[in-house]
Image: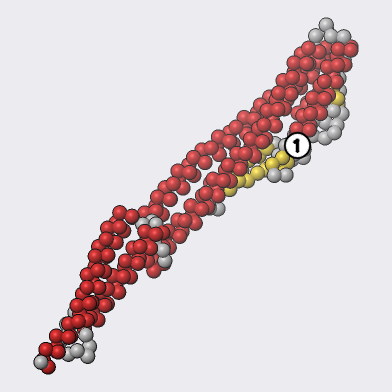
Amino acid sequence: MSFGDMTRINTNLQALQAYTYLQRTNTELGLRQLRLATGSRINRAEDDSAGYSIAAKLKAKIRGQEQALANIGDAKSLLTVAEGSLNSIMEILQTMKEKVVQAANDTMGAEERDAIENQLNQLTAEIGDILNATKFNGKALFSSASTVSLRFQVGDSTDAQDNFEVAIEAIANTSASVGLFSSVSQASVFSNGKWGLDTVAQATHALQAIEAAIQNVATRLGKIGDYQKRLSFKLDNLATAKNNYEAARSRIADADFAYEQMQLAKLQILQQTGVAALAQANVAPQAILQLFG
């Protein structure tokens, strides 16, 4: 650092140096105030180019994870819709079993069996309606033709573990047949959507079919429960990972308020002393006037 000759007044080096350092102090002071105002240590790439790049990548990953968390929530909602429909069907099947057990008793006459048949036919039609109405965002969850395959994006990458596949087996459902009872269609106990319970033997056969349907629905409910449990584990794991990435990004990009406030106090003092030093440097050349006295 050079110091000017006090006998040369055309260039006031002391004032220039005081001004330079005052400008540096003002720039640094503005940076600290910006960090305190925004809460961010890195507000521009020039503040920390490497840190800016790393923080930007972490932020992109975090935003992807946030959407994946929402995706998992939507997937669980979809499966809950399917589960609700199957639970309703299970309640209907339990009612049907109760009625068929009643019909399998020879204390029932023809009229009583006809009444039970009519009730079973209506309950079967309701099962078909439930299957047709079970949709999520317009997508049918129970197909009559083939297994409904669903793929959920449960992570922020294209890796295999970030994709979760669900298969909901088809249930044949037409105006003439409901696939849950297809095992008895050939015996004419259940044909063209209608039940026949003319004899105890037919009622017993129908009972077997309804029990098979109950087991079928119970198995499907179990699979949906397994899918939901896996999604719950993925949700918890992803939430934990997101929090960890947030912490990593914060250490790089967020401002330490205690440190920034400490630096701000120091810079404010330097600003005041810099202004005072500049003022003194500006008036120092006046001392040369004494040579003309």
Q: Residues within 10 Å of mark 1 (few under 14, many from 20)?
A: some
Q: Residue at x 52, y 49 (%)?
A: 66
Could you tell whether 157 is left or right of 279 in the image? right
The N terminus sits in image quarter: bottom left
Residue 90 falls in which quadrant of the image? top right
Q: Is residue 228 above or below residue 59?
A: above
Residue 167, how many percent across, how many down? 66, 39
Q: Is residue 286 above or below residue 235?
A: below
Would you name the residue on which mark 1 appears?
133
Q: Residue at x 87, y 29 (%)?
A: 192
Residue 262 falls in which quadrant of the image? bottom left
- The extreme top residue here reads 107
Type of the residue with mark 1: Ala
Q: Residue at x 19, y 82 (%)?
A: 283
The C terminus sits in image quarter: bottom left
Figure colour scheme: secondary structure
Please tell me which residue lies in front, 270 or 251. Answer: 270
Could you tell whether 86 is left or right of 261 in the image? right
In the structure shown, which secondary structural element does the residue marked by tag 1 occupy? helix
Q: Is residue 111 visible?
A: yes
Please tell me which residue lies in front, 203 or 228. Answer: 228
Residue 277, how many percent across, how many down? 21, 75
Q: Is residue 253 visible?
A: no
Q: Residue at x 84, y 9 (%)?
A: 108
- The extreme right residue here reads 110
Residue 169, how many percent across, how many down? 70, 36
Residue 70, how many percent across, how many down? 57, 46
Q: Is residue 180 above or below residue 21?
A: above
- The extreme front residue here reads 293
Could you tell whether 113 is left or right of 277 in the image? right
